Amino acid sequence: MTLALRSEVVRISFRDPFRIARTVDSNESDGMTSVLVELIADEAPGLVGLGEGYPDPYYGETEATMAAVLPRLVGSVAALEIRLVGPGADLAGARAALIEAAERMAAALGNNGAAKCALDTALHDLVGKRFGVPVHAILGLSATIPPTDFTIGIDEPAIVGQRAARAARFPALKIKLGGPADLETLRAVRAVFAGPIRVDANTGWTLEQGKRLVPELVRFGVELIEQPFPAHRLDDLAALQAVSPLPIVADESAVTILDLDRLVGVVAGVNVKLAKCGGPGPAARMLARARALGLRTFLGCMEETSVGIAASAAVASLADWVDLDGCLLLAADPFEGLELDGGCHWMLTSAPGLGVRRRA
């Protein structure tokens, strides 16, 4: 029994420059780099599982680290192939094997969430195609999900305002802050958009800035504040949440399910991303655990193709807020099959697996 994995590094330009407070290289704002994988199993001839992992150097990953660790991860789960997709496999057994696969990957290698995400996604897609069921059904989740917001990166306030006007059909906008003109940016957005605004400082503020800005954010009708301080500053997050009527949502401080318990009483919510926690299976379990702990749930994404967004959408029924717009930021998405419903809900259909395919 063997599991063969093919990987491909893709570099795709953004529709508009996209910069966040943590952007280091100016080239990062022009486009994204992601790793696509195809998983082929001897036990399921003709079927190919698609996966994607977005390597973020902030979390210690690059396309080079993914190439180095993917063979080890594949080796750690190869023995499960017959239970996942073999001729005698059943869906209940495959579901259990998917959970075991994530556990085996975690035991084989620490961290490396994007690499694990690529493989976990491909395994779910492969199992879905083998049994003719969508990924959300494999996970026992609903196809009814909240609408996605749309994210606008840091730029001159007038430019952000122009982009906000173009995105006004979305029910909420997520505005990247942490730059030199945060309030001017919000003023420009509010001039053209009447709906909820979610702000994300990507660790770019100090506690003093946060306390000073909160009353202004309330005045601008901001709905939530995402990760205002560095990941390790849980004391500052707790201090701001104590005085803020707006929910503080941890992102960089909430990487995997193991981070959740220490965030109880610190923040109101957590942002779960598949590329951080290791794929749709771990994300579903992280979202469920967060809810059980009384934390509100935000489902986010990286700047990914439809493969990554489809995998995220499969677990979106567990989220209070959804930010799955990564493929919408790209100048050209190499995949098709994932569609908005004419509004801002990703449509989860009965198509097997992720329901996406490469464009012809």
Image (cartoon, rainbow, N blue to C red):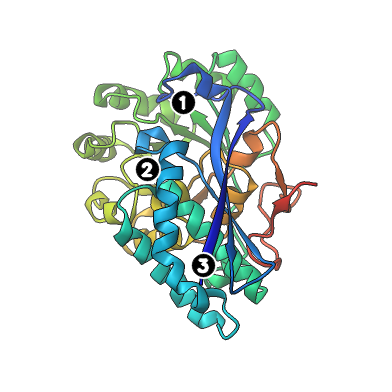
Image coordinates for residue 100, horizontal then vertical, percent:
39, 71
Image coordinates for residue 291, horizontal then vertical, percent:
38, 61
According to the image, label 2 marks what residue? Answer: 249
Image coordinates for residue 2, horizontal then vertical, percent:
51, 67
Q: Is residue 287 left or right of residue 229?
A: right
How packed mark 2 is, by other alpha carbons closer than 10 Å (few <14, some 14-19, many 20 or more), is: many
Please say whether residue 223 is visible from this viewpoint. Answer: no
Residue found at x 44% / y 53%:
71
Determine whether the residue tagged by mark 1 lies in a helix, strand or loop.
loop
Q: Amino acid at mark 3?
A: Thr
Residue found at x 31% / y 42%:
253
Asked whether the beta carbons under mark 3 and mark 2 sit within 8 Å of each other, the answer is: no
How far is disc 3 from disc 1 in space, using C-alphas?
41 Å
According to the image, label 1 marks what residue? Answer: 20
According to the image, label 3 marks what residue? Answer: 2
Between disc 1 and disc 2, the foreground one is 1
- Sequence-wise, the earlier of marks 3 and 1 is 3
User: In front here: 217 or 271?
Assistant: 271
Where residue 90 sits, quadrant-wise, is: bottom right
User: Where 309 sits versus 180, above or below?
Assistant: below
